[in-house]
Image (cartoon, helix red, strand yellow):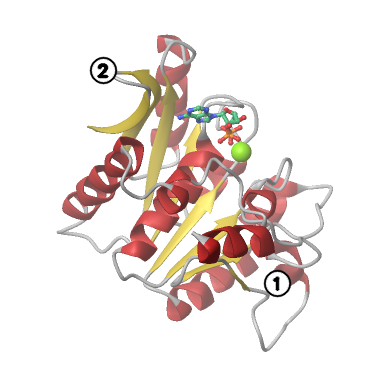
Amino acid sequence: MADKSEQQESHALDGRLVTFTHPRSPVAEAYRSLRTNIQFSSLDKPLEAFLITSTGSQEGKSTTAANLAITFAQSGSQVILVDADLRRPSQHRLFGLPNAVGLTTMMLENQEDLPLQYTAIPGLRLLSSGPLPPNPADVLGFRRMDEAIARLKKEADLIIFDTPPVIAVTDAAVLSAKVDGVLVVLSAGKTKRDQARRAYDLLTKVNANIIGAVLNNAKLDRGTYSYYAEG
Ligand SMILES: Nc1ncnc2c1ncn2[C@@H]1O[C@H](COP(=O)(O)OP(=O)(O)O)[C@@H](O)[C@H]1O
Ligand SMILES: [Mg+2]
């Protein structure tokens, strides 16, 4: 117990990182089955980099991205979580880390060392957003972004991107063309059917490989769960 509280203090981890704080909870178990489903969905095609998006804000994209990244790291994969929400970045806060450098600085400067930060979770490193640019969608669409993704893939087994909502801005659609798959978070009782349809249309228009949808905030027998549905 003393160890755990020390760890949490030094990293100021957010309570939403339930897969780390409560790995035996039903919610953590739900993230593990999500991980297994993603692994099975990619047996044919390697899934080295995927992004997580949703139709609107506050639907659980960042929470899902963080917990899924932790869950993959817990299974022994080397994982890099990238905060590609260059409008409202939140991953550095979730992991209690600074955001002075990150994805945007990596794009601007030809650095030898990537500005990756270690998290409290072994095997999981964070590339936070870095300072916010005036033109987020352009930045994500630049050819330099392809180079950045290629460099990240060399560094780890799996790259997971957190992004802004796909309906409001083009960022996620732009980035979806550069990664191997897209996972869409739907919020139970919040995401409307026509919004989900619109997100699906926007993503298929850019030939995104939709690997599945996650239902967040679903009330099952007890508490709040997230689970996976075949996309
Ligand atoms: N499964 C969940 N159970 C309870 N609260 C959640 C859950 N998922 C998200 N939230 C809460 O909803 C808010 C938005 O979540 P977040 O992951 O930041 O969404 P987004 O990245 O889509 O804007 C946060 O305050 C978060 O704590
Ligand atoms: Mg977010």
Residue under the image location 34 percent in, 43 percent down: 28
Q: Residue furthest front?
A: 2
Is ligand 2 less than 8 Å from the beta carbon at label 1? no
Instruction: Please tell me whether residue 168 is drawn above or below residue 122 in the rendered image.
Output: above
User: The residue under label 2 is which amino acid type?
Assistant: Asp
Say if residue 141 shows up in the picture: yes
Q: What crowding class fits label 2: few (fewer than 14 Cα within 10 Å), some (14-19), or many (20 or more)?
A: few
Label for residue 137?
none
Residue under the image location 38 percent in, 64 percent down: 73
Q: Label 1 vs label 2: CA separation? A: 45 Å
Looking at the rendering, the quadrant in which ligand 2 lies is: top right
Instruction: Please tell me whether residue 152 is drawn above or below residue 215 in the rendered image.
Output: below
User: The residue under label 1 is which amino acid type?
Assistant: Met
Residue topped by disc 1? 106
Residue topped by disc 2? 221
Along the line of sight, the residue nearer the viewer: 119 or 210: 119
Is ligand 1 less than 8 Å from the beta carbon at label 2? no
Report x, y in % for residue 138. Answer: 71, 51
Instruction: Please tell me whether residue 183 is drawn above or below residue 186 in the rendered image.
Output: below
Report x, y in % for residue 146. Answer: 54, 67
Say if residue 48 shows up in the picture: no
Q: What crowding class fits label 1: few (fewer than 14 Cα within 10 Å), some (14-19), or many (20 or more)?
A: many
Residue under the image location 47 percent in, 79 percent down: 155
Picture mark count: 2
Report x, y in % for residue 74. Answer: 34, 63
- 123 vs 227, left or right, is right
Where disc 2 sits, the SS reads loop
Quadrant where the C terminus is found in the figure: top left
Residue under the image location 33 percent in, 32 percent down: 213
Report x, y in % for residue 130. Answer: 76, 60
Where disc 1 sits, the SS reads helix
